[in-house]
Image (cartoon, helix red, strand yellow):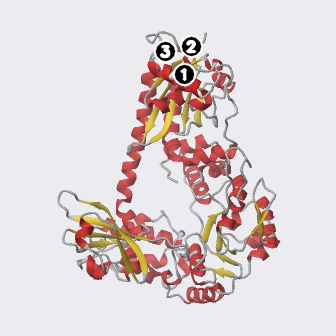
Amino acid sequence: MSVNISAPKETIPTFIQESWKRCHSKGLQPRIMDKENMLGEFELAEFQDQYAELLYYSSPILEDVYSSIHGMESILLLAAPEGYIIETVGDPSFIRHANNVALRKGANWLEESKGTNAIGTAIVEKKTVLIHGSQHFYQDNHFLTCTATPIYHPDGHLLGVLNLSSHQQDYHPFSISLVQRVADSIKQALLLAQTQKREKNLYFIYDQHPDPLFTINKEGNVTSLNIAASRAIGSLEQTTTGQPISSIISGLDTLALIKGLEQKVAIKNQKFTAQPLIKDTQHLSYVTLRLEKLKQIDEQTNRYHFSDIISNDSQMNQTISIAKRAAKLDISLLITGESGTGKELFAQSIHGVSLRRDKPFIAINCSAIPENLLESELFGYEKGAFTGANSSGHKGKFEAANGGTLFLDEIGDMPLTAQATLLRVLQERCVTRVGGNTSRPIDVRIIAATNKDLQKEIEAGQFRADLFFRLNGLTLKLPKLKNRTDLLMLAEHVLSYLPYRNESTELTEDAKTFIFEYEWPGNFRELQNVLGQAAFLANQNPITKALLVSLCPVSSPSRNVEETKEQEPTSMLDQEIQLIKKALERTNGNISNAAKQLKIGRNTLYRKMRTYKIMR
């Protein structure tokens, strides 16, 4: 029996009456429900990656709850704020019934799509709702009883919606409290993770921020600054701390700054906005100031330059010299080297001195994008090219980089089908968007990078030889960190730019020996990370070998050993953890691709990551 919108108000909750009115105003018909508003496989994967953190912490909770109510014909659903279902856990027999009304992953359950329903109405009402039987707008959904509640981020924005559905005859009054308790558990897990992450990264975020940051006291004197600020003004923190900010940045009005007013300033012929970020409003004891570079039409889009490459190693210096000469030839370049050796640093530096330096520098990681989305990312797509496509179409990276440089990182991981299309584009100098017929001329310089041996990939049939020769106008080989003769100089350089260093932040002799002998499998990134943690944990004491060893992988190999072998896992559990970590490393943390490589489901991977405390 259908809900009568004009029925007495005491029999139908007011919010349901209002929902029905909204549905009628949008022209929805109770007998005709849209079951086709579905995400495609790859659009769904994009949504799941977008809300990966929510899925990571909620999936094990949903599975635990379902195991406790196992036997009930029901289903637990998690929907994104946009109304799309991104996770389901439930009884197989009920799932079959739910599929008949598109109550499954990828379906949109906003009110404008599925009428009055728990998910869509909870989003509108911003509270827990129960929609029972014929209270659903569409007759196809009258067999359901559904309870949903919004899940909010600690800062107040909507993260998603939790829903419990079952047959209407199986309704139980505990469903409302159950859904609310489960949602509270998810929020608590997210809040705890956020707090732990904030504490862990508190001392690193400031220094790693890409914009120049200064902290000044109420007298206007600098108390700290990050690496970007040091580079902007050309001075280290130890020579700047204690100095008036007005003497460092000419034309800056300190009084106006403390009052929270933005100002335009110039440093080394570059224009910035001096923007106060946070301050102690009670005592005005400090202000954190950000210098944001003003956007210009002809502004160079890369952040790194050859001056940012620190080297006193003959092999690296020779590579830098070759790169500077090659930069002005406008030929394709292939940069090889292990992860963390500075491939993108070189690519951006080359662009910065090339004939294209006033045009865009666009980078794309070929291993971080799902295979079937890579071509649309590179070449763009026309409107209606696939389900979920932007209604006006989308230009790809080639068009975005037109006139400038396109950096194809991890080119060795590009699928063969995409390689063929890329080769055609490079040969014809035209790009055709996915789903389109019009060729668009493009003028880009290609710089590709890989940590793989492409010759071996060609022999294995995983990389096209003709594409290799097209990309390889010149190869730049970056050395491993362990092979560089200036390792200790690099370590000292890293320490000199740490925001929490002091006169005691120095390396003991045995620490220097360890740095020289350790293999550094993560190269410069690992060196930065380990030294950053060590300087903080040393707590104003010298950094010792024991501290460095504690921050590096157990049984790390030594450069004194000619042939090294990876440590064998001590148990099946250790082996599984290693496999998961390696898959995540290979895919740059992409859950979908990692799960595919491991041949397990996304939900299973989320659960195992949480169980083993593996963060991507």
Position of residue 341 measured from the top left corner of the image (x, y, whole percent): 56, 74
How far apart marks 1 and 2 lie (CA) works out to 9 Å
Q: Are marks 1 and 2 in contact (CB under 8 Å)?
A: yes
Name the residue nearer the viewer: 198 or 284. 284
Q: Are marks 3 and 2 in contact (CB under 8 Å)?
A: no
Mark 1 or mark 2: name the one nearer the start of the chain. Answer: 2
Q: Please, what is the three-letter code of the amino acid marked with disc 1?
A: Trp
Circle 1 packing at 10 Å, graded few (<14), some (14-19), many (20+), is many
Q: Please, what is the three-letter code of the amino acid marked with disc 3?
A: His
Residue assigned mark 1: 20
Residue assigned mark 3: 172
Quadrant hosting residue 326? bottom right
* 253 to 117, vertically: above or below: below
Quadrant hosting residue 108? top right
Q: Confirm whether residue 510 shows in the render.
A: no
Residue assigned mark 2: 3
